[in-house]
Amino acid sequence: MSIKNPYLQKVYQQVCQRDANEPEFLNAVMEVLSTLEPVIEKHPEYEAAGLIERLVEPERAVQFRVAWQDDQGKTQVNRAFRVQFNSAIGPYKGGLRFHPSVNLSIIKFLAFEQTFKNSLTGLPMGGGKGGSDFDPKGKSDAEIMRFCQSFMTELSRYIGAETDVPAGDIGVGGREIGYLFGQYKRLQNRFSGILTGKGLSYGGSLVRTQATGYGLLYFVQEMLSVMANDSVKDKVTVISGSGNVAIYAAEKAQELGAKVVALSDSNGYIYDKNGIDLNVVKQIKEVRRGRIREYMDAVPSAEYHEGCRGIWSIPCEIALPCATQNELLLEDAEKLIANGVKLVAEGANMPCALDAVAAFQNSGVLYAPGKAANAGGVATSGLEMCQNAMKYSWSKEEVDQKLHQIMVGIFHDAYNAAKEYNMENEQHQANLLAGANIAGFAKVADAMMAQGIL
Ligand code: NDP
Ligand code: 2IT
């Protein structure tokens, strides 16, 4: 990937200088700017208004200390962030990640991507992201609760139903959202929709738990139908990760008739040629918070391999990376291509390295970027905000139908934008990465232009 337009190049160079120690953020900026060239050429007024300079600089980034006591009474200190990237089209919206790898670069890349993703959903949400280098693994419920309470005590200064609405991401699920919500309510004496992914008994939306995975499959189904006159049915499918996104992607894939043969976690992967038994996986991951290797205890005929990237050497027709950023590198892409993969769609955020993406696109593999394909999670968060504002809740069928409609809409918006700007490979396949960036950018750019120099 490269940037040819002089204005975009200049802005990218400035970001490289200013944020030299933020590799993930630089990657995300390169990925977006490399596709905006035709739009910038059509709109010279954007350069005059310094629009791209403003687009790549977060409106606000806070870093704070989270001190808490572990079960031994020892004081622990973690570092936390909230990056409020862009509020042109709505209040900041985006998840919270608890993982030891969390740093400013990772949170900035996620918040930047979120800006375009949220725009693609068609709902009024700006881009934000937050998190901490806290590692939830091996912690007791009481430790998780104390950490969440301390984290929210500080975060509560910066969020609000009309200001910034966080949700879950890696390491933050229903349990954490419950503790965070409770603490906010106690501090503010206000029951308001300041988080999404809440439990159903206190303002959550039906289908939010399943939404990212289900939405990914709705997107893939539409993409296969339009771009290849094909469907998910009977396709051998490999899904990385075994968390929230991976589990519900697998569930919907199976419902649509795909054969899901592999899942992973950060230690290794399981291969079950007969098709993964998801009830076993849910027991391990959702109930016991165990490791994916425990699948072997229930299904001894499956295989377990140490190391997570080996999962990409399994021959498959559909590959859905649903774990984390940069989990699929060029050599993995080459293995998948050699083994005949037809479609790669990102459930995670930026799981494929930029050269891996280029390899897929150049070899005619259908490729869907995360900001389009995994937008079902935040879209359903948007629906949760909507229900909270109405003080009402929709049925499962109503939410699911809206989610489906939004995902089909995102596919067509990305596809049409790619066609409109002639962003295609040699086989005339629409470049959905370019299309998603252009379609997501359009609304944000329009709103920023209308609101003046801010
Ligand atoms: P979970 O915490 O539920 O699951 C994460 C999964 O990915 C686990 O299996 C975890 O394994 C694995 N994983 C995490 N970090 C690494 C790593 N460094 N190397 C290898 N494996 C890793 O998170 P989610 O399922 O919610 O999130 C997965 C991805 O989807 C992330 O990229 C997230 O940003 C993205 N996403 C999430 C949405 C949501 O609504 N939750 C919405 C849109 C995107 P282990 O247990 O060993 O850590
Ligand atoms: O990356 C993402 O889109 C999410 N983690 C979901 C964010 C949200 O606000 O629901």
Image (cartoon, rainbow, N blue to C red):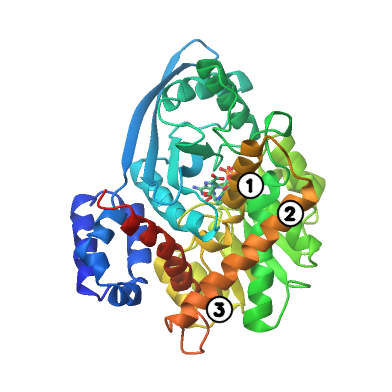
Q: Mark 1 points at which residue?
A: 383
Does the numbered disc 1 mark a residue whose Cβ is under 8 Å from ligand 2? no
Helix, strand or loop status at disc 1: helix
Three-letter amino acid code at disc 3?
Answer: Val
Q: Which of marks 3 and 2 is nearer the N terminus?
A: 3
Three-letter amino acid code at disc 2?
Answer: Asp
For label 1, count other residues whose C-alpha is less than 10 Å away and answer few (under 14), some (14-19) or many (20+): many
Direction bottom: furthest residue: 427
Nearest to the observer: residue 383 or residue 78: 383
Q: Name the residue under label 2.
A: 400
Helix, strand or loop status at disc 3: loop
Helix, strand or loop status at disc 2: helix
Q: In this view, does 8 lie to the left or right of 357?
A: left
Q: Name the residue under label 3.
A: 365
At a point 40% along the width and 30% down the height, the residue shown is: 158
Nearest to the observer: residue 334 or residue 211: 211
Instruction: Answer whether labels 2 and 1 touch (C-beta < 8 Å).
Output: no
For label 3, count other residues whose C-alpha is less than 10 Å away and answer few (under 14), some (14-19) or many (20+): many
Label 1 to label 3, Cα distance in Å?
A: 33 Å
Label 3 to label 2, Cα distance in Å?
A: 29 Å
Instruction: Answer whether labels 1 and 3 touch (C-beta < 8 Å).
Output: no
Three-letter amino acid code at disc 1?
Answer: Leu
Direction top: furthest residue: 73
Does the numbered disc 3 mark a residue whose Cβ is under 8 Å from ligand 1? no
Label 3 or label 2, whichever lies nearer to me, is: 2
At a point 78% along the width and 72% down the height, the residue shown is: 233
